[in-house]
Image (cartoon, helix red, strand yellow):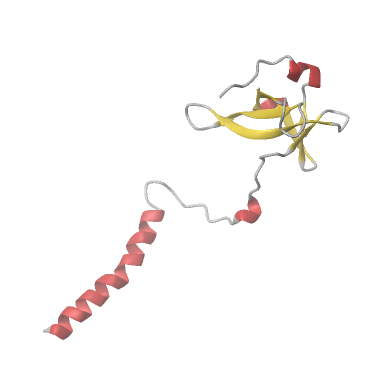
Amino acid sequence: MIRFALITTAAGLLALPAIAQDAETGAAGTVDTRDSAFLQSVDDTDVVNANGEKIGEIEEILVDSDGKPAGFKIEFGGFLGMGDKDVAVPLDALTWEAGRYVSKMTQEQLENLQPWDE
């Protein structure tokens, strides 16, 4: 009888990974298994103007109430973190070119935006 209980328990434990795998492809859909080689952080990524001159850095990606990306928080000005200014710009204000963001806005336009205050 003990032998039957051990076999039944072992069979039940072997079925657990299959249950967990089924849960991964359930109502939530297929789980994305890409590794970090496909991803990169945009924190502190340079923002340049049309001439390639650095005008700021990406600090954060801003999301709307649905959790979808809606804009960027850009930091510019200042020196060593002192006196800098943060502003929010919409996603379409920047384009991705050659490993950096290019602003469609001039530095003057960015400076005239309302400061982003969390």
Q: Residue at x 66, y 40 (%)?
A: 43
Toward the right, the furthest residue is: 51
Q: How many marks?
A: 0
Q: Nearer the viewer, residue 5 or 45?
A: 45
Name the residue at 68% across, 26% down.
Answer: 92
Q: Quadrant of the N terminus?
A: bottom left
- Residue 96 in the image: above or below residue 65: below
Kindly identify the residue that appears in the image at 22 percent across and 75 percent down: 9
Q: Where does the image place residue 102, in percent across and percent down from the top left? A: 78, 32
Q: Quadrant of residue 8?
A: bottom left
Which residue is rendered at x = 37% and y = 46% of the image? 27
**Rendered location of residue 17, percent (x, y):** 36, 66
Spot occupied by residue 38 in the image (x, y as percentages of width and height) = 64, 52
Q: Position of residue 49 (x, y in %)?
A: 82, 28
In this rendering, position of residue 17 left or right of residue 10: right
Point out the image quarter for the C terminus: top right
Residue 109 in which image quadrant: top right
Work out whether 111 lies above or below 12. Answer: above
Which of the 4 quarters of the picture holds residue 11? bottom left
Answer left or right for 112 relative to 22: right
Residue 106 is at least partly visible in this image = no
Q: Is residue 32 above or below residue 62?
A: below
Above or below, 98 against 37 in this view is above
